[in-house]
Image (spheres, rainbow, N blue to C red):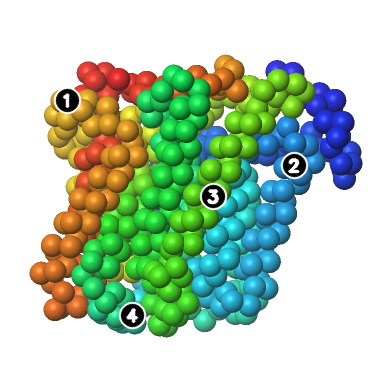
């Protein structure tokens, strides 16, 4: 595969670093890092490769991921409004959403920068020596949730916009894509904010502290700002990407980087494919059980949740039965954005019924029950690959 | 035991320790449902959001293994024409 030419740097690009260094950085974000990550974490590889479209702009996008990492580190270590966890800062979450939606490497590097700063800050202050397991467990939950916002939300929003049936007429096509991308981003960020209210609690409860008001307040009452940021960033991304596309050296560079990124596609998921059936089910169960730990009130709770999640996962992977072929075919004709909204809405109704009945008990277990019912709705409306393959009468393995 | 399974057991063991061993203060702060939300609707929104977050991440499963995603769709392929307007393939598996 041909190397991107140094001449790809546009003549009007401000000279901050040499063209060779600029091309090396562009290849690093768009080709090399995705290549390293593809066997182990394809979603993260995609997040880095997501910024390839900005390569045409030269120096700024080449250096921006480094600046994003520095920004994440700065927020974790120096930002005075973050005492315990990132959800105490609306500004940090807003910047992360904007960066991740505009260009994948920005979100991913800001995420890594934050984690490094957060870990070092906690370690130097001795928090890990006082309650190492509780501290590590709570932090792990918070990092998984932050990773969802930095990588998963933008990827899902983009996929929903690109894979929906689109009109042929160019202007209408762009308008529909804009709507789908913005609406998908908004809905996903909204759901993430609602989830954070309860899922972030282990950061505090696992070290025997009370959640701070600031850690909950922003996602519970000021989520509108984050949703608005997601809408603006996704619209800006799509408009910029569309209007700056075309021919010329910049377009050639982008095309070259994209082709090079996919030249080793056979290694994609090489490691994760080894974790067949039971292994993946176990990992998935433990992660879900860990994430729901903010709702537990006793030792039996994680056991029950793990049992339910194993059952749901086994069903989803087609280990214990399969969905009717007609249902799988039917739901897969429905745009993912609609399915997402329906799953969340039906989950809300189910959760409302449960919570209404158990409200007097004041138990967070009702929230866990509602969450698992919503998860079941997602599995029903987003059948797993194996379910799809079974329904389609074919198996890939 | 293959390398893949070794990794699985490492992850399982680490998460087991995190889940079981610490003397966790189970929800003793923001200690009740009513402290976290003032209304049933608010709590239901939180539950739906939590379920959505778990569902959105593939149920906690890193499903992006190069063979597709939770929709049964194919792995994204390299664009033949990166700037083409006609990139959408709504559902390759259908």
Looking at the image, tell me whether mark 2 or mark 1 is earlier in sequence order: 2
Question: Do we see residue A85 in this rendering?
Answer: no
In the image, taking residue A323 as reference, residue A86 lies left or right, namely: right
Classify the position of the C terminus of chain A by image quarter.
top left
Q: Nearer the viewer, residue A161 or B77?
A: A161
Distance from the alpha carbon under mark 2 to that under mark 3 = 23 Å
Q: Position of residue A176 (x, y in %)?
A: 43, 33
Horizontally, is A143 left or right of A79 in the view? left
Residue A146 visible in this rendered orientation of the protein = yes
Q: Which residue is drawn at 57% across and 74% down?
A: A82
* Residue that numbered label 1 is attached to: A325
Say whether mark 2 and mark 4 are on the same chain. Answer: no
**Helix, strand or loop status at disc 3:** helix
Separation of residues labelled 4 and 2 (CA atoms): 44 Å
Residue under mark 1: which chain is it in? A
Task: Verify CB contact (< 8 Å) between mark 3 and mark 1.
Answer: no
SS class, disc 2 = helix
> Which residue is at a point 33% across and 80% down the rendered structure image?
B30
Residues marked 2 and 3 touching at CB (< 8 Å): no
């Amino acid at each position: 595969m041909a190397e991107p030419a140094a001449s790809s740097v546009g003549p009007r690009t401000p000279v901050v670093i040499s063209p060779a260094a600029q091309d090396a950085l562009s290849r690093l974000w768009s080709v090399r890092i995705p290549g390293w990550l593809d066997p182990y974490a394809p979603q993260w590889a995609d997040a880095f490769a997501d910024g390839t479209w900005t390569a045409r702009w030269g120096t700024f996008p080449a250096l921006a991921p480094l600046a994003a990492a520095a920004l994440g580190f700065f927020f974790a270590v120096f930002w005075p409004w973050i005492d315990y966890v990132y959800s105490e800062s609306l500004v940090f979450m807003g910047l992360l959403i904007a960066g991740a939606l505009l260009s994948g490497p920005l979100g991913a590097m800001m995420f890594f920068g934050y984690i490094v700063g957060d870990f070092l800050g906690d370690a130097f202050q001795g928090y890990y020596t006082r309650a190492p397991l509780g501290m590590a467990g709570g932090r792990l939950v918070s990092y998984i949730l932050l990773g969802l916002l930095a990588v998963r939300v933008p990827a899902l929003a983009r996929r929903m916009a690109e894979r929906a049936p689109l009109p042929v007429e160019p202007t209408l096509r762009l308008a529909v894509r804009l709507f789908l991308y913005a609406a998908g981003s908004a809905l996903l960020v909204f759901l993430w904010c609602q989830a954070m209210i309860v899922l972030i609690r282990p950061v505090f409860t696992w070290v025997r502290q009370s959640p701070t008001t600031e850690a909950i307040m922003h996602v519970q009452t000021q989520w509108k700002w984050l949703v608005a940021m997601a809408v603006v960033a996704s619209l800006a991304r799509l408009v910029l990407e569309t209007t700056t596309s075309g021919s010329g050296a910049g377009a050639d560079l982008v095309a070259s980087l994209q082709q090079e990124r996919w030249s080793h596609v056979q290694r994609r998921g090489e490691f994760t494919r080894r974790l067949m059936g039971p292994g993946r089910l176990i990992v998935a169960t433990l992660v879900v059980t860990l994430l729901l730990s903010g709702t537990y009130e006793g030792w039996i709770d994680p056991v029950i949740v793990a049992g339910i999640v194993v059952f749901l996962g086994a069903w989803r992977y087609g280990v214990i039965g399969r969905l009717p072929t007609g249902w799988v075919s039917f739901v897969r004709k429905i745009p993912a954005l609609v399915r997402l909204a329906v799953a969340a809405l039906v989950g809300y109704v189910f959760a409302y019924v449960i919570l209404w009945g158990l409200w007097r008990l004041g138990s967070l277990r009702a929230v866990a029950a509602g969450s698992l019912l919503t998860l079941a709705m997602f599995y029903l409306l987003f059948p797993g690959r194996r379910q799809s393959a079974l329904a389609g009468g074919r198996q890939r393995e | 035991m293959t390398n893949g399974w070794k990794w699985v057991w490492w992850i399982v063991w680490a998460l087991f320790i995190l889940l079981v061993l610490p003397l966790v203060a189970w929800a003793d702060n923001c200690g009740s449902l009513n402290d976290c939300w003032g209304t049933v609707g608010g709590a239901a929104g939180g539950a739906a959001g939590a379920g959505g977050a778990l569902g959105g991440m593939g149920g906690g499963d890193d499903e992006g293994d190069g063979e597709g995603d939770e929709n049964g769709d194919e792995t994204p392929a390299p664009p033949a024409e990166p700037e083409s307007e006609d990139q959408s393939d709504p559902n390759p598996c259908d």
